[in-house]
Amino acid sequence: MKFLIIGLGSMGKRRVRNLQKLGYDDIIGYDTRKDRREETEKKYRIRTISDLSDGFAKKPDLMIISTPPDLHLKYANMAIKKNINFFTEVNLLSQHVVKMKKKVHDKSLIALPSSTMRFHPMVMKLKKLIQSGTIGKVLVIHHHAGQLLSNWHPWEDYREFFVSKRKTGGSREIIPVELVWLTYLFSDVKSIIAKADKVSMLDADIDDVFHMILEFKNKILCSMAIDVISIPSFRETKIIGEKGTIKCNFNDGLLMINKGTQWKEIKLKMGQAAKGYKRSTPPDTLYENEIENVLAIVKGQKKSRYGFDDELKILRILDAAELSSKKGKKIILG
C-alpha cells in the first residue's frame, strides 16, 4: 500500500512510525515547513514533499490528515476530489464534519475519523467488566482528564501550535477524545450542563477548564472535568455500580475493583509513549492498533465501527457544552 501523510508535526510523525512499525515503507510526507520535512527525512528515512501534486501523482491508497484540526476540511476536500481514501485525526469543528459527510456521501471511497481511545487497554478491559456485570448496573461516573498545556509538547512553545487557539484549544480537543470511549462504553448523551472558563495565567485565548454533568440516554449520570492546567497530569475515572466501584488510572494502567470489602488491583500492559512526551500521553501501541484497524477497513477485511456520523454526535456534545456555559442552562441533545 502507498500512503500520503499530510502534516509532519507531532501526529504526522507518529503516523509515520505507526506505518513503519506495521511493516509499510511506501510513505510520502507533506508539510509546508522545511524544518519538519528535514526532521522527518532524517528520523524516518522517507521522502517528503512541499508540493502536493507530487504526492497525488503517486496515487496513494490512503491519505492520513494530521494537520491542525481547523485544516482537516481543506485536505479532506482534496482527497474527495481525487477520490482518495482518507483518515483524519480528531476533528473539533462540527460544521466541518457536516461538510465532509455531505461530500463523501455518494463517493466510493473510505473516509474515517480517529477514535484512538477505543483501542486503549483500559477501555477494552472496562468493556469486558461492564458487560459481564462485575459491578452490576452502572449508575454514576466521575471522570477527570487534565494536563498542563505547556507539557503537551515539551519541545515547543504551546503558544505556537493549535492548542492555544480558541477554536482548537487544548480543553476543546480533550473533550471529544474522552467522549469517544465514554459513549462507546455507556450510551449516547441525552443532556448536558456545563461551565467553561479561563482560570489560569496561560498565555492563550482559550477556555482552560470545562466542568460538565452529562446524562446518558441509559440514565447514567457522569460528572466530567477537563482542563489544561493540571500538575501532574490526570486521566482518572471512577465508575459506581449497584454492586461496587471500579477506579481507573489511565496514566499508570491501574484498575481497581471494590465490591464492599477490599480493593482488587489489576495492572494492565500499556506499552510506552514515544520519546519526549509526558506521562499522560497514551502509548504508541494505541495509535498502531488504530491504524492497523483503518487499513483492514480500507482492504475490505473489516467494517467501520466509527465514522463521521458518530464523530458528529460527539462534536454536538462539545457544541452543547459551550452553549450551556454561555446560556447558563441545561442543553437537551436530539
Image (cartoon, rainbow, N blue to C red):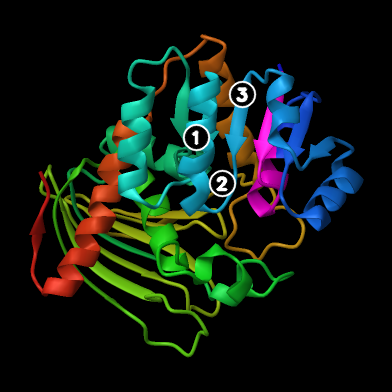
Q: For residue 10: magenta? A: yes
Residue 77 percent across, percent down from the top left: 48, 33
124 to the left or right of 84: left
Q: Which residue is mark 1?
A: 76
Nearest to viewer (mark 2 / mark 3):
3
Q: Quadrant of residue 172?
A: bottom left
Q: Please name whichever residue, 274 or 313, is drawn nearer the observer in this view of the structure.
A: 313
Q: Which residues are magenta?
A: 2-15
Spatial CA distance of label 2 from label 3 is 32 Å
Looking at the image, can residue 266 be seen? no
Q: Is residue 54 left or right of residue 303?
A: right
Say if 19 sits above or below 214 in the image: above
Q: Nearer the viewer, residue 167 or 57?
A: 57
First-in-chain label (2 vs 3): 3
Q: Name the residue type under label 1.
A: Ala
Mark 3 vs mark 1, CA separation in Å:
12 Å
Kindly identify which numbered label has been placed on residue 268. 2
Label 2 SS:
loop
Residue placed under numbered mark 3 in the picture: 62
Mark positioned earlier in the residue sequence (3 or 1): 3
- At 11% from the left and 72% from the top, the residue drawn is 327
